[in-house]
Amino acid sequence: MALNGVKVVEFAGLAPAPFAGLVLAHHGASVTRIDRPSSASTNDALCEGKRSIILDTKNPAGLATAKRLIAEADVLIDSYRPGVLERLGLGPEVFHDSEGKKGLNDKLIYARLAGYPREGPYASMAGHDINYIALSGILSMLPGTNEKPSFPLNLLADFAGGGLLCATGILLALIERGKSGRGQVVNVDMVSGARYVSSFPLLNANDTSPYFSKPRGSNTLDGGAPFYDVYTCSDGKWMSLGCLEPQFFATFIDRFNATLRINGMKTKWTPTRAKQFTQDDWPEVRKYIEEGFKMMPRDYWADVFQDSDACAVPVLSPAEAASIDPTGSHRPAPHPQLSRTPASFQCGGSSTILEPGTHNEEILIELGLPAEERKQLVLAGGLGVEMRDKARSKSKL
């Protein structure tokens, strides 16, 4: 695999940081997650191929062990708010050489993943995906109702602008390290990341744009066009329609009209190919398409447009989508696919939850800690008070 031999330390978090670590793990990196003491499983399903160690970084012994682990790593993924690791004594200045001072690991790729830009009025605030895309400018452009825009789950900021761009930055830094021999800090914030992955709409948000020149909800790609939308069928399921180009719209409307005639739908007005870009006719075209799709169930319409260029395909449930996945797994497979160094993927299994501390002993042994040092680390509370108390109780028996 492409990243065999690359050691990654990931501080436990939710969504973007685990996804960045998952991308690396799928391609062969050895990813060790540092969990906090006394924490139950974080229900993080993005943990395939990873290992877990519990370390109390507020405890001197636990902090020293974390520092030792990072000193031997190629990559660190920081999932905390800006400044947290610095206050713990685990900032990049500890590991990188600077101003004539030797760091513990100058080859370390130190990836910091934050919500808001590190400089600015929101830097220290709490937030989630919806807040980040709100500040990015893209939420104001997304489809929704006349009263307000909607949001696409927590995909744009957490995963596209956060985790995926973080993994991209890490890979870029690893490539550069191959030339310079030195690591560097990779700064990712999800507001800026969401803006970057939204470059096309944001750069086209102007009066001359063919895509976004009108108010939200009345443009081609934001729900305004009847030929780029989702329609409800007679069984309550949906069909997606995306016939933007004239030749694709022609294929759709010709086949749609013919099917409605076969099924006995009678209307006073039938849209033709020429009506695609006549915006005054869009409300009537939309009503016609809505009523037409509601005549028959989704799978009927899927068969109608199968093997055509109508750009009309069914909206599948997660289970349905998994059934046609080439891997046959409900777990999304790593992508893109590499021909010579394919990713590692456990398809077909249930969603894995990595319990904190599962690999404590294994990881400490790999770090070179002999049995007595491992024992003292536990007794000192480096792995948390719960394990310390268990060890003390056991020693009294």
Image (cartoon, grey):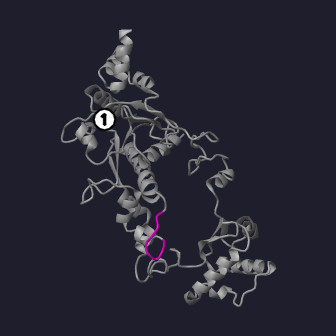
Callout 1 secondary element:
loop
In the image shown, does 180 or 213 lie closer to the viewer? 213
> Which residue is the extreme one toward the top?
397
In the image shown, does 237 or 185 lie closer to the viewer? 237
Residue 230 shown left or right of residue 369 in the figure: right
Tell me if residue 344 comes above or below residue 325 in the rendering. above
Instruction: Inspect this view and state whether residue 66 appears.
Output: yes
Q: Quadrant of the C terminus?
A: top left
Residue type, mark 1 in image = Asn
Question: What's the magenta region?
Answer: 143-151
Q: Residue at x 79, y 77 (%)?
A: 263
Residue 83 shown left or right of residue 297 in the figure: left
Q: Residue at x 57, y 41 (%)?
A: 351
Residue to which mark 1 is pinned: 105
Q: Position of residue 101 (x, y in %)?
A: 20, 37
Q: Is residue 13 magenta?
A: no
In the image shown, does 75 or 296 lie closer to the viewer? 296
Overall secondary structure of the magenta section: loop
